[in-house]
Amino acid sequence: MLDKDLNWLISREAIGDLPVRYCDCVWRDDIDSLVDLFASSGSFVAVFDGIETVVSGRKALMEFYEAAVGFMPRPYIHNHVVEIVSAEFATGRCYLDLRSGRHNMDWLGAGFYEDEYVKIDSEWKFKLRKFTALRMEELPDGINLSQ
């Protein structure tokens, strides 16, 4: 029982660290480290006004995030909820307040992430990171609402 509880706590801590590291990478424009938080077949999905943009695989993720660097988002996440489903899979949600590094930290938008996490070897990664915007004042490059 103790081993199971300890493994759960270790997994919970590692999973809880993923969204924090994600935001830290965004703040520092560290795209290599950001993409490394995803599984090799991982996906990022952005939903704006009901329209989804899907980016899958490391190469596409790298191109997407590199294109968004000039957008200068400054994310603040909170209320992270995690459900560990198995020893190798978990889900979670967290909420986002977004500021603009280009515009004196003005409010840029808000929304929430719905995540799927997968354990690869001994490391937890994003399998899916889905962001749903509740309100956005500006959109990053690579988001196309005319789909």
Image (cartoon, rainbow, N blue to C red):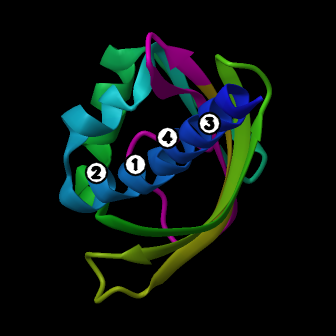
Which residue type carries mark 2? Cys
Judge from the rendering whether residue 64 lies leftward or rightward of residue 39; answer left or right.
left
Q: Amino acid at mark 3?
A: Leu
Disc marking residue 22: 1
Residue 145, image x, y percentages: 62, 44
In this rendering, which labeled residue sits more in front, label 3 or label 1?
A: 3
Q: Is residue 88 above or below residue 81?
A: above
Task: Point out residue 34 in the picture as x, y percentages from the top left corner.
Answer: 31, 39
Left or right: residue 2 versus residue 24 is right
- Which numbered mark, 3 or 2, is in the foreground of this view? 3
Q: Which mark is residue 25?
A: 2
Where is residue 78? Give x, y as percent.
Answer: 60, 69
Give me the disc on residue 115: none
Depicted 34 relative to depicted 77: above or below: above
The image quarter in which residue 122 lies:
top left
Mark 1 and mark 4: Cα distance apart in space: 13 Å
Q: CA distance from mark 3 to mark 1?
A: 25 Å
**Residue type of the residue flagged with mark 1:** Tyr
Q: Residue furthest front?
A: 2
Q: Position of residue 62 (x, y in %)?
A: 29, 28
> SS of the residue at dot 3?
helix
Q: Residue at x 30, y 83 (%)?
A: 103
Q: Nearer the viewer, mark 1 or mark 4?
A: 4
* Residue range corresponding to the magenta coloring: 118-147
Earlier sequence position, callout 4 versus callout 2: 4
Q: In what quadrant of the picture does the N terminus appear?
A: top right
